[in-house]
Image (cartoon, rainbow, N blue to C red):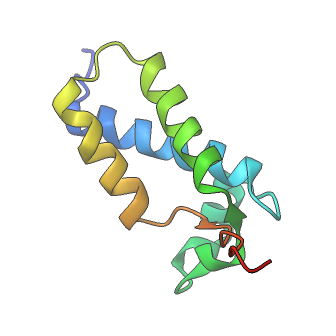
Amino acid sequence: MVKRVSREEKLHNVVVEIYKKMYAESTPPGNWDEMMESGETKTDFFFDNYVLSQERSDAIIEDVIKQYKWIKKYEVPKIKTTIYLGCSPRFNPKPSDDD
């Protein structure tokens, strides 16, 4: 008997895929699976140790979402909110105009 995967599980898997790509491109690079296995992700504010530009973060999210045609338009904000309020790498501080 084949187990049917719920829509929530599918969306969760999309979020995890986005995290994997974000951490792979962050500074320093991180391997999401190894971070989960080692327990690093259970440490408070572990994500502050990794940096990725907001522009690149947005691009990764958009690229992954485009891969899955089954994602409904109304689900996209939910995915983005989950990523941004979750444990994504922190954004590079923007240079000020004074620099």
Residue sitting at x 55%, y 50%? 19
Vertical position of residue 32 compared to residue 65: above or below = below
Query: Does residue 83 appear to the left or right of 91 in the view shown?
Result: left
Query: Does residue 32 appear to the left or right of 11 in the view shown?
Result: right
Query: Does residue 86 appear to the left or right of 48 in the view shown?
Result: left
**15 or 77, nearer to the observer:** 77
Direction bottom: furthest residue: 44
Direction front: furthest residue: 98
Query: Does residue 55 appear to the left or right of 85 in the view shown?
Result: right
Residue sitting at x 80%, y 77%? 99
Q: Quadrant of residue 74?
A: top left
Vertical position of residue 38 compared to residue 18: above or below = below
Vertical position of residue 13 compared to residue 34: above or below = above
Residue sitting at x 22%, y 26%? 73
Residue sitting at x 35%, y 43%? 12
**Residue 15 image offset from top left, x and y in percent:** 42, 44
